[in-house]
Amino acid sequence: MNRRDRTVTRAYGGSRCGACTKNRIIRAFLIQEKKVSKKADKAKKARAAPKKSLKQKQAEAAAKAAKAAKAKAKAAAAAQQVVAEDLKKGSKLAKKQAPTKHRV
């Protein structure tokens, strides 16, 4: 019998039986479907996530700026307190750092 007559015209030729070929094709299809499904789920979750409006973003930015300003003011008040305490003690460095009154 010729070699051409012994092989079949499908994937893997005659090197695999029909059931093995069927299982491989099904497995490849299911793996591909799993990838597509995972990608679709990811896209669905991204769409479902609530998007912040411009007003919400501006409100968050304003709150962040207010928090930073409050922290800066607190640090400045603490520094003034340290200078005031040093002035009471009579520190020379504190006298240099202390704000001076200018006459106009």
Image (cartoon, rainbow, N blue to C red):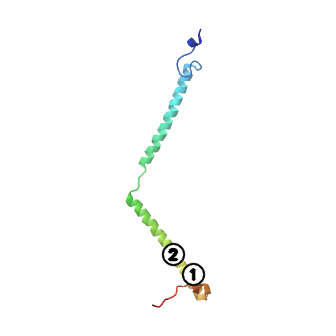
The residue that appears at 47% across and 38% down in the rendered structure is 37
The residue type indicated by label 1 comes to Val
Q: Position of residue 98 (x, y in %)?
A: 55, 85
Above/below status of 20 relative to 44: above
The residue that appears at 45% across and 69% down in the rendered structure is 66
- Please identify the quadrant where the N terminus is shown: top right
Above/below status of 4 relative to 72: above
Which callout, 2 or 1, points at the residue further toward the start of the chain? 2
- Please identify the quadrant where the C terminus is shown: bottom left
Query: How many residues crowd mark 2 within 10 Å: few (<14), some (14–19), many (20+)?
Result: few
Q: Quadrant of residue 56?
A: bottom left
Mark 1 lies on residue = 82
Query: How many residues crowd mark 1 within 10 Å: few (<14), some (14–19), many (20+)?
Result: few
**Image position of 30 (left or right of 57):** right
Q: Position of residue 9 (x, y in %)?
A: 52, 18
Above/below status of 96 relative to 31: below
Q: Residue furthest bottom?
A: 103
- Report the disc number at residue 74: 2
Describe the element under mark 1 as helix, strand or loop: helix
- Report the disc number at residue 50: none
Q: Residue furthest top?
A: 1
Q: Quadrant of residue 52?
A: bottom left
Q: Quadrant of residue 19?
A: top right
The residue type indicated by label 2 comes to Lys
Of 50 and 5, the residue lying toward us: 5
